[in-house]
Amino acid sequence: MRELPKLYAIADRATLDARGMSVREFAREMAQAGVGVMQYRDKTGTHEEVLCAVEEITAEFEGRDCLLILNDRADLALLAGWSVHVGHEDMTPEDVRALMGARACVIGVSTHDEAQMIAADAGCADYVAVGPVFATASKADAESVVGLEGVRRARALTKKPLVAIGGITRENARSVIDAGADSVAVIGGLMGKGETPRKLAEDFLEILR
Protein backbone atom coordinates (compact mmCIF):
# COMPACT_ATOMS: atom_id res chain seq x y z
CA MET A 1 0.00 0.00 0.00
CA ARG A 2 1.04 3.63 -0.38
CA GLU A 3 2.52 5.49 2.56
CA LEU A 4 -0.11 6.61 5.05
CA PRO A 5 -0.38 10.37 5.59
CA LYS A 6 0.64 11.45 9.08
CA LEU A 7 -2.87 12.74 9.85
CA TYR A 8 -5.59 10.08 9.78
CA ALA A 9 -8.91 11.87 10.27
CA ILE A 10 -11.91 10.00 11.67
CA ALA A 11 -15.49 11.14 11.22
CA ASP A 12 -17.28 9.49 14.13
CA ARG A 13 -21.05 9.77 13.80
CA ALA A 14 -21.72 9.88 17.54
CA THR A 15 -19.15 12.65 18.05
CA LEU A 16 -20.50 14.66 15.12
CA ASP A 17 -24.08 14.33 16.38
CA ALA A 18 -23.02 15.46 19.86
CA ARG A 19 -21.37 18.57 18.36
CA GLY A 20 -24.28 19.32 16.02
CA MET A 21 -22.27 18.87 12.84
CA SER A 22 -23.36 16.92 9.78
CA VAL A 23 -21.23 14.26 8.15
CA ARG A 24 -21.21 16.21 4.89
CA GLU A 25 -20.06 19.42 6.59
CA PHE A 26 -17.23 17.65 8.40
CA ALA A 27 -16.15 15.85 5.22
CA ARG A 28 -16.14 19.14 3.32
CA GLU A 29 -13.88 20.73 5.94
CA MET A 30 -11.48 17.77 5.83
CA ALA A 31 -11.39 17.84 2.03
CA GLN A 32 -10.71 21.58 2.01
CA ALA A 33 -7.88 21.11 4.52
CA GLY A 34 -6.24 18.55 2.24
CA VAL A 35 -6.61 15.49 4.47
CA GLY A 36 -5.18 12.40 2.75
CA VAL A 37 -6.98 9.64 4.66
CA MET A 38 -10.33 9.65 6.40
CA GLN A 39 -12.32 6.95 8.13
CA TYR A 40 -16.06 7.00 8.72
CA ARG A 41 -17.24 5.29 11.90
CA ASP A 42 -20.90 4.66 12.74
CA LYS A 43 -21.49 1.82 15.17
CA THR A 44 -25.29 2.12 15.36
CA GLY A 45 -26.51 3.37 11.99
CA THR A 46 -28.61 1.27 9.65
CA HIS A 47 -27.20 0.09 6.33
CA GLU A 48 -29.15 2.86 4.61
CA GLU A 49 -27.86 5.56 6.99
CA VAL A 50 -24.25 4.46 6.63
CA LEU A 51 -24.46 4.28 2.84
CA CYS A 52 -26.04 7.74 2.74
CA ALA A 53 -23.13 9.14 4.77
CA VAL A 54 -20.64 7.29 2.56
CA GLU A 55 -22.19 8.86 -0.54
CA GLU A 56 -21.96 12.34 1.02
CA ILE A 57 -18.31 11.85 1.96
CA THR A 58 -17.45 10.44 -1.46
CA ALA A 59 -19.03 13.48 -3.11
CA GLU A 60 -17.04 15.93 -0.96
CA PHE A 61 -13.75 14.20 -1.80
CA GLU A 62 -14.45 13.79 -5.50
CA GLY A 63 -11.35 14.63 -7.51
CA ARG A 64 -9.12 14.69 -4.41
CA ASP A 65 -6.42 12.20 -3.49
CA CYS A 66 -7.80 10.77 -0.25
CA LEU A 67 -7.99 7.19 1.01
CA LEU A 68 -11.55 6.63 2.29
CA ILE A 69 -12.01 3.92 4.90
CA LEU A 70 -15.16 2.51 6.47
CA ASN A 71 -15.03 1.22 10.01
CA ASP A 72 -16.16 -2.39 10.44
CA ARG A 73 -18.88 -2.52 7.76
CA ALA A 74 -16.95 -4.49 5.13
CA ASP A 75 -20.09 -5.40 3.19
CA LEU A 76 -20.98 -1.73 2.78
CA ALA A 77 -17.39 -0.81 1.96
CA LEU A 78 -17.53 -3.36 -0.86
CA LEU A 79 -20.65 -1.69 -2.25
CA ALA A 80 -19.10 1.76 -1.94
CA GLY A 81 -15.66 0.87 -3.28
CA TRP A 82 -14.02 1.99 -0.01
CA SER A 83 -11.32 0.40 2.12
CA VAL A 84 -11.98 -1.13 5.56
CA HIS A 85 -10.80 -0.90 9.16
CA VAL A 86 -11.76 -3.64 11.62
CA GLY A 87 -11.44 -4.07 15.36
CA HIS A 88 -10.05 -7.20 16.97
CA GLU A 89 -13.62 -8.37 17.70
CA ASP A 90 -14.94 -7.66 14.18
CA MET A 91 -14.34 -9.60 10.97
CA THR A 92 -10.74 -10.71 10.62
CA PRO A 93 -8.60 -8.99 7.97
CA GLU A 94 -8.40 -12.34 6.21
CA ASP A 95 -12.22 -12.57 6.02
CA VAL A 96 -12.39 -9.00 4.73
CA ARG A 97 -9.78 -9.78 2.07
CA ALA A 98 -11.80 -12.82 0.98
CA LEU A 99 -14.98 -10.75 0.81
CA MET A 100 -13.30 -8.06 -1.28
CA GLY A 101 -11.95 -10.60 -3.76
CA ALA A 102 -9.73 -9.11 -6.43
CA ARG A 103 -10.75 -5.51 -5.70
CA ALA A 104 -7.92 -3.32 -4.44
CA CYS A 105 -8.64 -2.55 -0.82
CA VAL A 106 -6.57 -1.24 2.08
CA ILE A 107 -7.35 -3.11 5.30
CA GLY A 108 -6.47 -1.87 8.77
CA VAL A 109 -6.88 -3.60 12.12
CA SER A 110 -6.98 -2.31 15.70
CA THR A 111 -4.79 -3.73 18.48
CA HIS A 112 -4.57 -3.01 22.20
CA ASP A 113 -1.84 -5.30 23.49
CA GLU A 114 1.31 -7.10 22.38
CA ALA A 115 -0.42 -10.40 21.57
CA GLN A 116 -2.88 -8.65 19.24
CA MET A 117 -0.05 -6.69 17.66
CA ILE A 118 1.97 -9.84 16.97
CA ALA A 119 -1.10 -11.50 15.42
CA ALA A 120 -1.84 -8.43 13.31
CA ASP A 121 1.74 -8.26 12.08
CA ALA A 122 1.54 -11.89 10.96
CA GLY A 123 -1.82 -11.39 9.24
CA CYS A 124 -2.82 -9.75 5.96
CA ALA A 125 -3.77 -6.30 7.25
CA ASP A 126 -2.04 -3.48 5.40
CA TYR A 127 -1.64 -1.32 8.50
CA VAL A 128 -2.02 -1.77 12.24
CA ALA A 129 -3.56 0.65 14.75
CA VAL A 130 -2.56 0.83 18.41
CA GLY A 131 -4.26 2.60 21.28
CA PRO A 132 -5.67 4.31 23.10
CA VAL A 133 -2.42 6.20 23.49
CA PHE A 134 -3.98 8.73 25.85
CA ALA A 135 -7.32 8.90 27.64
CA THR A 136 -10.16 9.48 25.17
CA ALA A 137 -13.82 10.46 25.36
CA SER A 138 -14.57 9.45 21.77
CA LYS A 139 -15.12 5.77 22.53
CA ALA A 140 -17.32 4.65 25.39
CA ASP A 141 -15.76 1.18 25.72
CA ALA A 142 -12.15 2.24 25.24
CA GLU A 143 -9.40 -0.17 26.30
CA SER A 144 -6.70 0.68 28.86
CA VAL A 145 -4.35 3.50 27.88
CA VAL A 146 -1.08 2.24 26.36
CA GLY A 147 0.84 5.52 26.49
CA LEU A 148 3.82 6.49 24.38
CA GLU A 149 5.67 3.42 25.66
CA GLY A 150 2.93 1.27 24.13
CA VAL A 151 3.53 2.97 20.80
CA ARG A 152 7.26 2.25 21.09
CA ARG A 153 6.59 -1.42 21.88
CA ALA A 154 4.17 -1.67 18.97
CA ARG A 155 6.76 -0.14 16.64
CA ALA A 156 9.24 -2.81 17.70
CA LEU A 157 6.71 -5.57 16.97
CA THR A 158 5.69 -4.66 13.43
CA LYS A 159 7.18 -3.32 10.23
CA LYS A 160 3.72 -2.48 8.90
CA PRO A 161 2.51 1.13 8.88
CA LEU A 162 1.51 1.99 12.46
CA VAL A 163 -1.45 4.24 13.27
CA ALA A 164 -1.77 5.54 16.84
CA ILE A 165 -5.18 6.53 18.17
CA GLY A 166 -6.72 7.85 21.35
CA GLY A 167 -6.65 11.28 22.95
CA ILE A 168 -4.31 12.77 20.35
CA THR A 169 -4.22 16.56 20.22
CA ARG A 170 -2.18 19.25 18.55
CA GLU A 171 -0.09 19.43 21.72
CA ASN A 172 0.91 15.75 21.84
CA ALA A 173 0.70 14.62 18.21
CA ARG A 174 4.38 15.15 17.45
CA SER A 175 5.42 13.09 20.48
CA VAL A 176 3.35 10.18 19.15
CA ILE A 177 5.09 10.31 15.77
CA ASP A 178 8.45 10.55 17.53
CA ALA A 179 7.55 7.42 19.53
CA GLY A 180 7.32 5.46 16.27
CA ALA A 181 3.84 5.93 14.81
CA ASP A 182 3.61 6.58 11.09
CA SER A 183 0.23 8.26 11.44
CA VAL A 184 -2.03 9.68 14.17
CA ALA A 185 -5.77 9.05 14.08
CA VAL A 186 -7.76 11.99 15.40
CA ILE A 187 -11.45 12.32 16.28
CA GLY A 188 -12.21 14.80 19.07
CA GLY A 189 -9.07 16.78 18.32
CA LEU A 190 -10.70 17.88 15.07
CA MET A 191 -13.74 19.29 16.86
CA GLY A 192 -13.00 22.35 19.01
CA LYS A 193 -14.88 25.36 20.33
CA GLY A 194 -14.28 28.50 18.32
CA GLU A 195 -12.19 26.70 15.67
CA THR A 196 -13.43 24.95 12.56
CA PRO A 197 -12.49 21.33 11.80
CA ARG A 198 -10.67 22.66 8.72
CA LYS A 199 -8.51 24.98 10.86
CA LEU A 200 -7.75 22.18 13.33
CA ALA A 201 -6.86 19.75 10.53
CA GLU A 202 -4.60 22.34 8.92
CA ASP A 203 -2.87 22.84 12.27
CA PHE A 204 -2.27 19.10 12.60
CA LEU A 205 -0.94 18.92 9.06
CA GLU A 206 1.49 21.76 9.77
CA ILE A 207 2.64 20.25 13.10
CA LEU A 208 3.20 16.85 11.51
CA ARG A 209 5.07 18.01 8.40
Image (cartoon, rainbow, N blue to C red):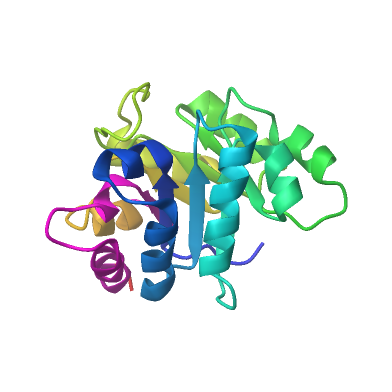
Asked whether 194 or 67 is in front, the reply is: 194
In the figure, is residue 47 to the left or right of 180? right
Q: Position of residue 137 (x, y in %)?
A: 26, 32
Residue found 54% across the figure and 49% down from its top: 53
Q: Is residue 140 above or below residue 118?
A: above
In the figure, is residue 90 to the left or right of 7? right
Residue found 32% across the figure and 70% down from its top: 205
The span picked out in magenta is 179-207
Is residue 182 covered in magenta? yes
Residue found 42% across the figure and 50% down from its top: 10
Q: Position of residue 83 (x, y in %)?
A: 66, 52
In the figure, is residue 171 to the left or right of 125? left
Figure quadrant of residue 89: top right
Viewport quadrant of the N terminus: bottom right
Q: Specify the farthest residue to the bottom.
A: 63
Figure quadrant of residue 132: top left
Q: Is residue 35 above or below residue 131?
A: below
Figure quadrant of residue 29: bottom left
> Does residue 159 appear in the picture of this structure?
no
Is residue 97 covered in magenta? no
Q: Specify the farthest residue to the right.
A: 102
Residue found 69% across the figure and 30% down from its top: 92
Q: Position of residue 93 (x, y in %)?
A: 70, 37
